[in-house]
Image (tube, helix red, strand yellow):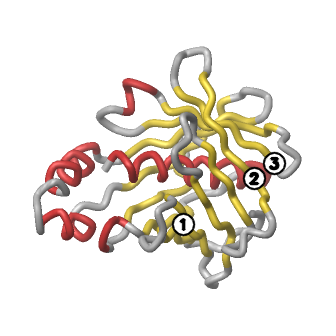
Amino acid sequence: MQKIQFPVNFEFKVSTIANDFTATDADGKTLAYVRQKMFKLKEDIQIYSDESRTKQNYSIKADKWLDFSTAYKFLDEDQKEFGKVVRKGWKSIWKAEYKIFNGSEQEKYNIREENGWIKVLDSILSQVPVLGILTGYLFNPSYIVKDQDEQEIIRLKKMPSFFGRRFELTKLGEMNEEDNDRIMLSLMMMILLERRRG
């Protein structure tokens, strides 16, 4: 996923049982097709080059880490680990927070939800008949990726849509090119988790 043209869009499918989505760049080119295996005790995500699913480029697998927060490790096509994203347990109950690590276990970036109240209102009102259909247009949480110097790199925002189907990534600052894949995979894993939470 090198030389990405922003903005990037994640669009979930509503016609399948699986929790899957397509990532496309500003030119409409498919960057990845993300598929979550259903009925697994641990998260198991496959990232393909496109919707044909003929070439799998990456996978993301859940693991446990030393601080008891769930970690999701990134594996390349040869099943070699090259980084992970870790959800910060109790901290993420109010506002989502994740840490991105490289293959040497060094923390490189963090992802934080900008406004926790939006998620709360979205979760509550989505349970109300009729209103639940409209929450995809009313409440749209956003998340910021920052580097270790607190410089903003990328914003991921839920876009107005039925059933919370669309998300957009906009570039805010420069990032190390070798970290592109780790950041994109982290956001893909995070949005699968956060979308399920409301």
Q: Which residue is mark 2?
A: 58
Residue type indicated by callout 1: Phe
Q: Which residue is mark 3?
A: 76
Query: Helix or strand or loop: what does disc 2 sit on?
Result: strand
Report the front residue among 5 and 186.
186
Mark 3 and mark 2 in contact (Cβ < 8 Å)? yes
Residue type indicated by callout 2: Tyr
- When asked about the image quadrant of residue 132, the answer is bottom left
- On the image, the x and y values in percent for residue 115 come to 29, 47
- When asked about the image quadrant of residue 100, the answer is top right
Graded by Cα atoms within 10 Å as few (under 14), some (14 to 19) or many (20 or more), the crowding at tag 2 reads many
- On the image, the x and y values in percent for residue 149 come to 58, 37
Q: Which residue is farthest right?
A: 78
Residue found 61% across the figure and 35% down from its top: 62
Q: CA distance from mark 1 to mark 3?
A: 19 Å
Residue type indicated by callout 3: Asp
Graded by Cα atoms within 10 Å as few (under 14), some (14 to 19) or many (20 or more), the crowding at tag 1 reads many
Mark 3 and mark 1 in contact (Cβ < 8 Å)? no
Mark 2 and mark 1 in contact (Cβ < 8 Å)? no
> Looking at the image, is mark 1 or mark 2 earlier in the sequence?
1
Q: Which residue is mark 1?
A: 21
